Amino acid sequence: MANRIVHTSKMAWVLDPKEPMDGLVADGGTIVARVSPGCWGAMITPDYASGHEVTHPIAVEGAEIGDSVCLKIKKINILSLATTSGTDSFIDGNFVGDPFVAKQCPGCGLINPKTYLEGIGEDAIKCSACKTSVKPFHLENGYTMLFNAERTIGVTVPPQISEEIACQSQQFSAIPTGSCQYSSNLLAKGDLWGILARVRPMVGNIGSCPSVAMPSSHNAGDFGSFLINAPHQYALTPEQLLQRTDGHMDINEVGEGAMVIVPVKVAKAGIYVGDVHAMMGDGEVAGHTTDVSAEVIIEVSVIKGLTIDGPIVLPCCENLPLLARPYTDAEKNEAARFCQNYGFPIETDVYPVQVVGSGTDLNTATANGLTRMAALTGFSIAEVRNRATITGDIQIGRLPGVVQVTMLTPASILEKLNLLHLYKMQYQ
């Protein structure tokens, strides 16, 4: 029997459609997810084959292959008191093919070895078999950020305080009981201190289960490309990569009040969430940002018969590109007055449609997004390019290869897609 509310804190590293799902959440029900931090904690935990830890996929009542599921983000409560992040570099000899997936002990050669902690810092994580430090990544330029009680601002702290936080790393990260990762605070980095930042929480990895097993961090066209013909157990062919669902978007507009429409590529969808950030600028140019533990509350509804390849985002109105914001009554009246002597109709009943595209680089991601937008709306790619240029935008979600293609789209098209009620709810 489906539940109106499903609580989850069980974490997963690999999204595998063959694994049983948790749930079942009712169509129209709510998921309350307690999530662990995203990138750096998982990256420095050699035991598991992913660069992310996300909630175990949850089954959705009535969601069938070829449908879509709308995820309304009702609330993001940051639980961490501090986080550590920064730019990375790979350490040769400590991984096979992909440092996020196949972490290797440089001492005994084990892949994804069991480990234990000894002290703090980058050398603190040791192989249980041979006691060698296992670190596939080096934190080149890093910082530890401490949050105020209200979680409205963060401040980066000096090295001495970062070391004090590292000695209580799990507590400052508020790692949930279902998590298997080491806290990134363990790294004790204080290269940048005294920097003030506004907290604006967003969800970096949210979506539905792909129809082929892949590490949760690689469920996108850019990170997923690392899996093609890779020398480890999660290698994919180019054709298999098309079975991704692009949940790892890192789009900073995916925050409280936003909606994300995701494809259903396996029966019952398998909704998951993770990689919450305290703040992130467009592009995530550092490669990583402020990963935190959080409680995320999501309202779930099934959209029957809407077959899409990747996510559609409905940001809050204030987060839309200026050209894609719905027209005011004054703008509509002025357009009608201006055009009344010319005798042709104008489009004023329009809504901002934002389609996610991903690929190995920004050009490939943009082409993917344009193709998805054309398939959704029925317009040619050439027309989509024009409409996105004069009534929308191309925004960078994450470097190297996630973008949002946005354009104002006639309500008549959204009505045929059974989406108009969602757009009216979000933008009226």
Image: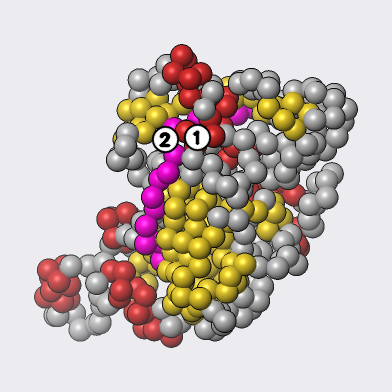
Graded by Cα atoms within 10 Å as few (under 14), some (14 to 19) or many (20 or more), the crowding at tag 1 reads some
138 lies left or right of 257: right
- The kind of secondary structure element at disc 2 is loop
- Residue 109 seen by the camera: yes
Distance from the alpha carbon under mark 2 to that under mark 1:
8 Å
Which quadrant is home to the N terminus?
bottom right
The stretch in magenta equals: 71-90
38 lies left or right of 200: right
Instruction: Determine which quarter of the picture holds residue 43.
Output: top right
Q: Earlier in the sequence, mark 2 or mark 1?
A: 2
Please tell me which residue is depicted at 60% across the width and 29% down the height of the picture: 88
Q: Are marks 2 and 1 in contact (CB under 8 Å)?
A: yes
Q: Which residue sits furthest right?
A: 108
Horizontal and vertical percent position of residue 170: 54, 34
Mark number for residue 204?
none
Please tell me which residue is depicted at 54% across the width and 46% down the height of the picture: 176
- The kind of secondary structure element at disc 1 is helix
- Which amino acid type is marked by label 2? Leu
Residue 243 in the image: above or below residue 54: below
Mark 2 or 1: in front is 1
The residue indicated by pointer 2 is 81
345 lies left or right of 373: left
Graded by Cα atoms within 10 Å as few (under 14), some (14 to 19) or many (20 or more), the crowding at tag 2 reads many
* Residue 332 is one of the magenta-drawn residues: no
- Residue 306 seen by the camera: no
Residue 163 in the image: above or below residue 215: above
Instruction: Determine which quarter of the picture holds residue 57.
Output: bottom right
Horizontal and vertical percent position of residue 194: 35, 20
Q: Is 326 in front, or is 383?
A: 326
* Residue 79 is one of the magenta-drawn residues: yes
Mark number for residue 171?
1
Please tell me which residue is depicted at 70% across the width and 54% down the height of the picture: 14
